[in-house]
Image (spheres, rainbow, N blue to C red):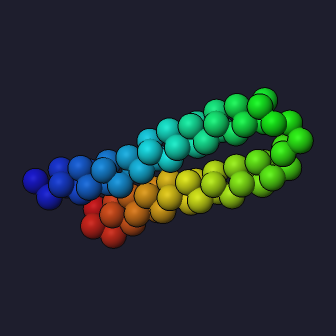
Amino acid sequence: MATGFIAIGAGIAVLTGLGAGMGIGKATGSAVEAVARQPEADSAITKNLLLGCALAEATAIYGFVTALLIILMLG
C-alpha cells in the first residue's frame, strides 16, 4: 500500500514540468509578439526571455529531483 502513495507523491512532484512547459511556451509566444511589434528592442526582450525560461526550467528540474528522491529514498 505504501508503494502506491510513493508513486502518487512522485507523480505529483513531476507535474511541475507541466507548469514550466506552459509558462515557457507563453513567455516565448509573448516575446515573439513583442519583437514583431518593436524589432529594435530585440536584445532586451531576448535577455529577459532567457532569464525567465531559465527560472521556469529550474522549477521543473526541482520537481524532477524531488520525484527521484521520493522514489529512491522511500521506495
Left or right: where 47 falls relative to 56: right
Where is residue 37? Give x, y as percent: 77, 31
Left or right: where 36 falls relative to 52: right
Task: Let me know if residue 23 appears in the view.
Answer: yes
Res. 73 image quadrant: bottom left
Task: Let me know if residue 68 appears in the view.
Answer: no
Tell me if residue 41 comes above or below residue 52 in the rendering. Answer: above
Res. 33 image quadrant: top right
Q: How many marks?
A: 0
Where is residue 71? Give x, y as percent: 34, 60
Where is residue 50? Give x, y as percent: 72, 52
Q: Residue at x 89, y 41 (%)?
A: 40
Left or right: where 45 falls relative to 10: right
Q: Residue at x 42, y 50 (%)?
A: 16
Q: Residue at x 78, y 29 (%)?
A: 36
User: 24 or 74: nearer the eye?
Assistant: 24
User: 70 or 16: nearer the eye?
Assistant: 16
Q: Residue at x 28, y 62 (%)?
A: 75
Res. 67 image quadrant: bottom left
Extreme right residue here? Answer: 40
